[in-house]
Amino acid sequence: MNIICVKFGPKYGAEFVNKIYKDLHYPIDFYCYTDNADGLHKSIKIIPDMGRPTLKVWWNKLRMFDKNFPLSGKTLFLDLDVKVSAFPEHLNVSWNKITFIDCHWKQGKLYNRLSNYDVKMNSSMITWDADNPEVHKIWDHFNTGFKDYYLRKYKGIDRFIVHEDFEYETFNHQYIQSKKYQEDINYEPIITTFEEMEVGIKDLI
Amino acid sequence: MESKILYRALKLSEKIYDESMYGVDDLYRIKDIVHSVDKNHWESKKWLADKLFELYGYNEGKFYVAGGWYGMMAYHLRQKWPGEEMNIVSADCDPMCEDYAWDLFGDADIDFRTVDVNDEQDFSEYSGIINTSCEHMEQEDLISIIEKKPEHTWIAFQTNNYVDINSHINCWPTAQLFSESLGLKYTACVDTLQMKDFNRFMVIGK
């Protein structure tokens, strides 16, 4: 299984990537797709910025679904602002479909409105088969004449994927802890997410 | 802002809402269209049309508006060049822009098209190429337009320093640096329009 992080722009430094790599404690194929490889651990395999179309910060995550992206097979993506607590060796996921985090803590009428905009999934952790043509359709759909419109319409890739009607599955809830919404849990998650929170490297230790 | 344009924008919003009830659900288009006719866009596009009119010096020709969005730039050009001897093309890669531009400015004798700027290879027939969306476009595409155009074809480009927008991939800190990046052989105007939250930069030349 490939494990990959995406680092673009100055918000998160190399130490965030190195921390995830070291926390995994395992001989793995660990990749970083980045516009700046300075300071990354020497064992991390670098995938340099693939260039056009130029994208900003988190929108570069979509590039992982380009059929020309240099990965093959089962792949796990982790955001840089997650805390890794266990090695995700035996993920019980369907590799036939792309899989995201189910934000089951988001409740309320908002999510049932016709004009609902926020979504109940997030992409802090994603699994997919990099050879799956259904996943490549996500990039192909984005990279059309509507690209600039999507960048205006959607705050990030989560909303793009949900509102453009791509099919996906979600992880077992016990793989994930949301720091903001699930402070006390009675299980051992694989990762803790910090969505909607400002995160420093010390928060991830 | 002219009341007829506002009225058409309202009617277009109604049409998009109606469509969302029975067909394509894309209510964000309403927000996008409202944004396209707001005061900032009205002023910055009028600013370009006024300045280009001063410099161009002829009634006839053919203008190509790249990244023309819903047609506001082409409309302002038509206000300055009302005669049929000026041909105006407004192109955008988003196919919905062509549809909605006809709704907003269909009586302004403008040829709205769906074209990706990378697919427009032949600029030989144009006497002016206008682009107020440079902040959304790859720098190498802007340079490519300049390299492909005839020597005497005018260029009128705008960008801005509003880097906090995700779709703004080609912002510049000053008008002068933007001008230098384009490498025009002749530069007639390098100017800045101060907006509320950012500056808009304009370069006109050949």
Image: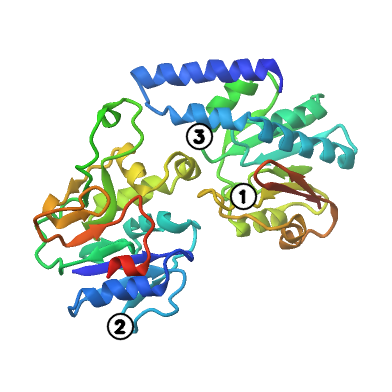
Is label 2 or label 3 in front? 2
Left or right: A156 as drawn, with respect to B57: left
The residue positioned 24% from the left and 68% from the top of the image is A3
Tell me the quadrant of the picture where the C terminus of chain A can be found: bottom left
Subunit of mark 2?
A
Q: Give yes or no for contact between labels 2 and 3 (Cβ–Cβ under 8 Å).
A: no
Residue type, numbered disc 3? Pro
Q: Which mark is residue B95?
A: 3
Q: Amino acid at mark 1?
A: Tyr
- Mark found first going from the N terminus, 3 or 1: 3
Q: Secondary structure beneath disc 2?
A: loop
Task: Residue B155 in the image: state x and y as whole percent.
Answer: 76, 48
Query: Of discs 1 and 2, which sits in the foreground?
Result: 1
The CA span between labels 2 and 3 is 46 Å
- Within 10 angstroms of label 2, few (less than 14), some, or many (20 or more) residues? few
Q: Disc 2 marks which amino acid?
A: Ser
Q: Tell which tag, 3 or 1, sits nearer the viewer.
A: 1
Residue B168 on image: x %, y %: 56, 50
Q: Quadrant of residue B84?
A: top right
